[in-house]
């Protein structure tokens, strides 16, 4: 069975596209997939009830991405790939990358190809490029490798170690957004006001570096404060929505150590850092029925 995890960017989204580091975690929820020889190439996606051809010129990005994936296997039979998606799409949890990783992993398994998760992550970048044009590579990397990682575009993922698990509660705003559009919006702001946006990126980089130390030291109080500050900088880049802000505020009032939007923004998800497992369950009630708890060990 092929598997691609979802991911949560703890700090550093958007700045990571422009060369700054970011910290992200892989979560247990993601995409599973199987592949088998068939009469023709087909990609089935549930629960969306989609059946797509591989078409390099298709209107659907998934058709083009599937064509790119299949082209990586020069001698193969026609393949039917069935993927089960257990992540909201357009929600900042790396859904497209997780599908790509799961699909490639399933094809590898069907064809008896063995490769490392790092090589799988590299291969899945070509899939991600169909969706985002200019991805940093963090989504496909975290989806394939998981754990808690310090990532900088072009460098190998650096796993972070700590003796204290992170209790995250992920809340979905119910609003979907396009990563491509949000990344383009930051790109436009950078072009028109380079000084302000570069200052924002510099600020984010400082937060990321301090968060790395806080995670390694198991200092979740400091980490929570850094998350809140990162959220404020992302708001200043017009990436946040009222709904996401309200959810973060509600989580903080209910005892979260920190809360921020995650991923591209403009909708999608936020997350809160809970002090303990039982508090995470309580925060889940505050964040609504679409929220879920993820315990991540570094
Ligand atoms: O919203 P998602 O899950 O696609 O995450 C995007 C993260 C960005 O930093 C905004 C883009 C990127 O390629 O790193």
Image (spheres, helix red, strand yellow):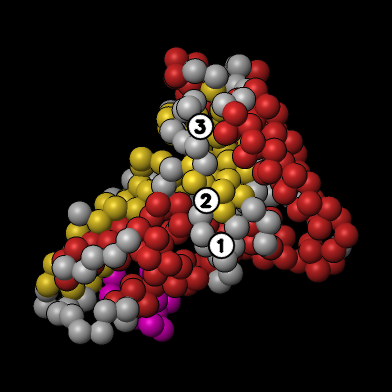
Q: Would you place residue 137 above or below residue 292 in this image?
A: below
Q: Residue at x 64, y 53 (%)?
A: 21
Residue depicted at x 45% and y 15%: 278
- Residue 98 image point, x, y percent: 39, 55
Front-lying residue, 195 or 261: 195
For residue 59: magenta? yes
Dot 2: element: strand
Q: Residues within 10 Å of mark 2 (few under 14, many from 20)?
A: few
Dots 1 and 2: beta carbons under 8 Å?
A: yes
At a point 78% along the width and 46% down the height, the residue shown is 203
Residue visible at 32% across and 61% down in the picture: 116
- Figure quadrant of the N terminus: bottom left
- Say if 254 sits above or below 237 in the image: above
Badge 3 marks a residue whose secondary structure is loop
Q: Which residues are magenta?
A: 52-64
Horizontal side, residue 205 vs residue 121: left or right: right
- The residue at which mark 3 appears reads as 162
Dot 3 and dot 2 residues touching (CB under 8 Å): no
Residue 143 visible at all = yes
User: Residue at label 1?
Assistant: 155
Label number found at residue 158? 2
Image location (x, y in percent) of residue 297? 43, 33
Residue 50 figure quarter? bottom left
**Where, by quadrant of the figure, is residue 49 drawn?**
bottom left
Which of the two labelled residues, at mark 3 and mark 1, occupies the earlier sequence position?
A: 1
Marks 3 and 2 sit apart, C-alpha to C-alpha, by: 13 Å
- Residue 80 appears left or right of 215: left
Q: Is residue 100 visible?
A: no
Residue 283 spot, x, y in % from top left: 51, 21
């Amino acid at each position: 069975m092929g598997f691609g995890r979802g991911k949560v960017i703890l700090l550093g989204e958007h700045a990571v596209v422009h060369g700054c580091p970011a910290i992200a975690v892989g979560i247990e929820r993601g995409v599973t997939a199987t592949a088998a020889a068939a009469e023709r190439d087909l990609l089935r996606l549930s629960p969306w009830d989609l059946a797509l051809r591989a078409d390099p010129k298709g209107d659907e990005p998934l058709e083009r991405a599937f064509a790119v994936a299949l082209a990586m296997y020069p001698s193969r039979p026609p393949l039917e790939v069935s993927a089960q998606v257990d992540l909201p799409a357009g929600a900042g949890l790396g859904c497209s990358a997780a599908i790509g990783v799961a699909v490639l992993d399933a094809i590898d398994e069907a064809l008896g190809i063995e490769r490392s998760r790092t090589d799988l992550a590299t291969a899945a970048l070509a899939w991600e490029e169909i969706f985002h044009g200019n991805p940093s590579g963090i989504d496909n990397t975290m989806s394939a490798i998981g754990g808690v990682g310090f990532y900088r575009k072009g460098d190998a993922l650096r796993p972070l170690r700590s003796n204290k698990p992170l209790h995250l509660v992920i809340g979905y705003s119910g609003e979907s957004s396009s990563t491509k559009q949000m990344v383009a919006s930051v790109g436009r702001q950078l072009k028109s006001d380079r000084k302000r946006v570069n200052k924002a990126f510099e600020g984010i980089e400082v937060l990321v570096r301090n968060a790395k130390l806080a995670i390694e030291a198991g200092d979740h109080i400091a980490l929570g404060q850094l998350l809140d500050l990162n959220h404020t900088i992302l708001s200043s880049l017009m990436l946040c929505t009222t709904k996401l802000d309200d959810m973060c505020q509600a989580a903080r009032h209910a005892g979260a150590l920190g809360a921020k939007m995650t991923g591209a923004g403009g909708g999608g998800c936020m997350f809160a850092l809970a002090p303990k497992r039982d508090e995470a369950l309580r925060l889940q009630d505050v964040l609504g029925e679409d929220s879920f708890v993820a315990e991540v060990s570094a």
